[in-house]
Structure formats: C-alpha cells, structure tokens
Amino acid sequence: MNMLEANHAARDLLAGVEGGFALSVLDSSPDCIKILDRHGRLVFMNRNGMCAMEIAEFGAVADRPWPSLWPAESHSLLEGAIEAALHGETRIFEAFCPTALGKPRWWHVTAAPIRGTHGIDNILVTSRDISELVGAREALRAEVAAKEDALRRQKLLLGEIDHRVKNSFAAVMGLLRMQARRHRDDASGQALTDAATRIATLARVHDQLHLDPGAPDLPLIDYVGALASDLGQALNARVEMGHTPASTLRVSATQAAGIGQVLAELVGNAVKHSGGHRRARVVICLDLVGDGLSMKVCDNGPGLPEGFDPAAQDGLGMQICLTYVQQMQGRLEHGRSDLGGAMFRAVIRPEPVATH
C-alpha cells in the first residue's frame, strides 16, 4: 500500500467526521499517530510519525501487527493495550522501541478506542518521543544514587569520628578528674575539676548534635536537661530543671555551646560556694522574656556577699560567663534566690535558626 492509498483508507476510516480535515490534523501532529484495525494491524501512520520512526514508506509497515514493530519484551504490553481498547478502555504507558534504523527511543504511548456506529471499529495509537526526558530522568536517578551512596559513606565516617571524639572527651575528663582527686585539698584540684566540667559541657553539645548531624540546630530543653543531669553527677549535687516555658525553643549549635558554658560555670560556682554543710541544690529555669531568652540558675547556698559585683570578680568562671553573655548580646543579673541562696540570670538574644 502506497501513501496515497493509505490516505484514502484513512479518509474512509474517518468518514463522517470530515475525513480530509482530520487527516491534515493528524499529519500536522509532531507525535507518531497510528490507526489500527480490530486485529491490531497498522492501517495508517501520519507523516511525522514515519519521520520519528525513520520509516521511509508506509508500505513497509502497512497491515503489519503493531506489536511486531516493537522489541519482543514489549509485545505482551502492547497486546494488552489492544485488548483493552477493544473493550472500550484507554491504556497509557511508557516503553522502549528503537526506530526502523535502530536508533534507541523511549515513547509515551496512548492507545484508545475509535467508536463507530456499530461499536469499536478501530484503535487510535499516539506515541510521543520522550527519549530526552527519560535520559534526564535516568541521569537524575544516577546522580541521586551517587549522592545517597556518598551520604551513606559520610554517615559511616561521621560515626567513626564521633566514636573517636567521644573517647577523646572521656579520656581527657577521666585524667582531669583523677588529677583533681589527687589535689583535692589545694587550689589546683578545684581548677582541674572546673576544667573537667567545661569539657563535659562541650561533650554534651557534641552528643546532642550527633543525634541529628544534618540539623542546623537543636532543642534547647533537651540539651539543657541532659547537661543538668551530667553536671549533677559530675559535681555530686542535685541539679534539676525548674519552670521552663521555653520548652519548644531551638538554638544553633554555636549558641548551644555558649549557653552550655554559661550554665556550667554558674552551676559549678553554686556547688563550689554551697558551704559544704549539705548537698547543694541547683535549679535551672528557662523562660522567654520579650524577644530574649532568660536562663536563671538558683541555689540553696549561703547567697552572695554584700556589694557583690560579677565584673569585679577575678575568678575564671565568672569571666567566662560574662564573656559568653556579652557575645550573645545579653546581660547577667544577680540577686537572692527563692531557695535561700544566690540567683544568677543571663538574658540573651537567641540566634535565628532554620525553620523545620
């Protein structure tokens, strides 16, 4: 069958719907459009379709079963689409089929019934070349797979690094505390204890961040609660969380380290100056004050001396507190606590963090 005969056959098939006009519409489509008879044989293919499939003459494929133009592995898929169309259904799928000259192509295919006066007379098949889209999709999949593999390897590496860092923190704290016990009765012993406490604070920041290495921030209440527990064990004191309305606040890792150092120094000072006649009790309260964060530390010790001035103290701990509070654009207040001892309150400006 030559092209002219095929066109006449198509006009007959499309009789009643202005066949000549419909034929020109089909030929102008950039897609490969085919009409099959009820047996699934090709009775029409538009010009652009033959170009896309690299078919020189329609006669080369006329009356051939549509599946015979496809790789064997696609035959059942196409036969199912033909069967579905004969039952009035439309099938849409993607499949691979090289051109007549062997060039690889991927197609988005729609097979739909053509209804006549006595039921379904023919099947309309539209195939769109999506090779570039499939290629881009495969490239994206490969890129995602490569990144996932890199993330898995990074996670393993981070786990190994985390293990080594934790061991290093533990080793340093153990050595400092051992030396502190040996120098229990002199000033160097207290200095060693203070150093161990500061390292414990850094270790707690590390632990919190490792729970979710990809997160840019961490929940403040969880971090401070865990730090309070650590400090209580390390200092043999009762360190607990009090009223904490700021329970949903998240802070950056950098600010968490600063907050941890301030709280560790204030708790350590409270225990150190508790008087030793009873077990020190320290309560940490977090609250939101306007656009600031209030961190209050209260103890049951003897309280502060008359005329106490934090800025005039020459102790390293108080100087660390003032430095970190100033870096966080805050202020340090002091007074008497409800527990009968000293009260320190650091009010800082929380850093903005990414929204989750």
Image (cartoon, helix red, strand yellow):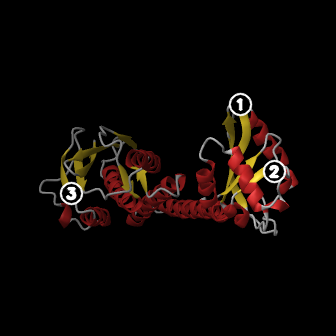
| C-alpha distance separating marks 2 and 3 | 83 Å
Q: Nearer the viewer, residue 92 or 209?
A: 92
User: In the rendering, at what x and y percent does residue 158 appear?
Assistant: 60, 63
Q: Earlier in the sequence, mark 2 or mark 1?
A: 2
Q: Which residue is mark 1?
A: 119
- Amino acid carrying mark 2 in the image: Trp
Q: Nearer the viewer, mark 2 or mark 1?
A: 1
Q: Residues within 10 Å of mark 1 (few under 14, many from 20)?
A: few
Q: Is residue 239 above or below residue 208?
A: above
Is disc 2 placed on a helix, strand or loop? helix
The label number, if any, that marks residue 66 in the structure image: 2
Q: Is residue 322 above or below residue 292?
A: below
**Side of 347 where 214 appears, left or right:** right
| C-alpha distance separating marks 2 and 1 | 21 Å
Q: Which residue is mark 3?
A: 332
User: In the rendering, at what x and y percent does residue 135 appear?
Assistant: 67, 65
